[in-house]
Amino acid sequence: MALKRIGIIIILLVGAMATAQTSKMADVIDEFRADTRGLRHIYIMEESEEYYQRFSTFYDSWMNRLDAMDFNSLSQQEKVDYIMLKNSVAKGDYFLNQDFEKFKEVSDVANFAKPMLPFIQQRRRGKKPDAKMLAQRMQNASKILDEQMAARKEKPFKDWQTADKASSTVLSFQKGLKNAYEFYYSYDPDFTWWVDQPYKALDKKMTGYAEFIKENYSQNSIKDDGSGIVGKPIGKEALLESLAMEFIPYTPEDLIKVAEEQFAWCKSEMIKASRELGYGDDWKAALEHVKNTYVPAGEQPEAIMDLYTQSVDFIEERDLITLPELAKETWGMEMMSAERQKVSPFFLGGKDIIISYPTQEMDHDDKMMSMRGNNPNFSRATVHHELLPGHNLQYFMTSRHKPYRNAFYTPFWTEGWSLYWEIILWNKEFPQTPEQKLGMLFWRIHRCARIIFSLKFHLGEMTPQECIDLLVDEVGHEYANAEAEVRRSFTTNYPPLYQLAYMMGGLQFYALRHEMLDKGWTEKQFHDRVMHEGRMPIEMLRALLQDLPLNKNYKTKWKFSTEFN
């Protein structure tokens, strides 16, 4: 018995050493991130020749450095880190070049600024400026702006996207000039005396010039389809490049097809639950019934806590994953403001859970939409998504295990993991009543719709209003909630692939789970190992867990299964 116990201890220690293995690449990755932050700290005019040229040189130097490394001498952990870092450099360089080409089309809008660029650059090292000469240059620039605005009225930009880029170029210079002006103003009396009035006049003209340029585009270019939501479709080529750099070896059309198949499955299951409720095939009527199971105002935090307890108990009873006691102790609750609910109508999570529910300043219709859209049966699929074992556990574990891999953040890992748990809990019959099933299916079908509308928008095949209509008519959203979801998708900082990453990342995790279980792993072993390896594209996690052959120019190729029902 003693020898058996010793053997078990040795196996456990070896397993712990494998997951805790450090990587020689960790410092290199941290250096790359620090270099990036350092350059962005200095080169604050992001729409300028100087910025694009400096970062182009930066990415080239890093690519040369990586190419010079002896890849074959690296451990598997280090090879994975190498590939992910090289991918990050390539991704940064690709999108920089995309933006640079668009900048070149409009850079002449800032020709008036060229005489003042040395002042901005020399300010970084505190050189005393020739204040009188600078004041004259600012005065000249104001006159040039008047002439340029008059000339450009007859030459609108080809579309609103180009006009927006041109406006951003002017605003970028305005930001740099303000930074330099505020450095010397009041401190240097000669500068203050000469430059104060010319600067203020020029600053005001730049604001007007940027506003004018932004709206000076061909009338054939449609900016707003009537929804009030304006996004920037990136096109098929950029989508394909983005997918490859996220290690997704599928075309947008492939992913839309998968989403449509999963959408049909969800609709079929919703009809089954509708029949259980006595509404026959009228799933919309059944969904209306579920929406009206909302709790009274003021009681949502307790309802969330109840759902949290149910899901944690369910998971721990089945020993599916290790949930550290401190992780269960240290998550917090916040309430979401009415303003934030305009783009995030449902609660969010991470370090804390941020609860979306009506506030006093909302009008009656918005209050009802918020309550109906956040009823406990809908929330059954999302409390564990936001807390444990979803985003909160991710935050907890990645802060403690291989935190350098936070450099490789990808929504396919972040959102995919949380969506994966929605699939797991559904399969293990966490929802028992037809109301609970409809609630979880509502979110499942919503994730499918996100893939369809986000990809078709970026392919130029759907407008924002059509995206809203899809969510209302085919998913069952309240209109205001659908509008907020589409606005969140296209007008915030979420990248173009973010919305499809939920379902596709979930499918990747589910496929990898099957592969690891077939190799003799338990579910708990798999789940715990994922949380100890840190953030990364799931194809790279697969290569790490299965010790797959890798090369320094590795490209995505894993055709993960879409069979998960």
Image (tube, rainbow, N blue to C red):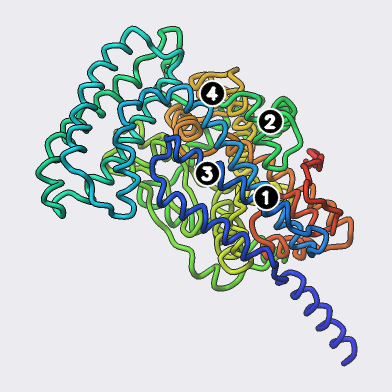
Give the residue at x 62% y 51%: 62
CA separation in Å, label 2 and label 3: 23 Å
CA separation in Å, label 2 and label 1: 25 Å
- Left or right of 438? Residue 554 is right
Q: Residue 467 carries which label?
A: 4
Could you tell me residue 224's position as x and y percent? 42, 17
CA separation in Å, label 4 and label 3: 36 Å
Q: Name the residue under label 3.
A: 55
Q: Name the residue under label 1.
A: 64
Which of the pair 167/276 is nearer the observer? Answer: 167
Q: Could one spot residue 271 in this view of the protein?
A: no
Which of the pair 192/37 is nearer the observer? Answer: 192
Q: What residue type is labelled 3?
A: Phe
Mark 4 residue element: helix
First in sequence: mark 1 or mark 4? 1
Nearest-to-viewer mark from 1 and 4: 1
Nearest-to-viewer mark from 4 and 3: 3
Q: Are marks 3 and 1 in contact (CB under 8 Å)?
A: no
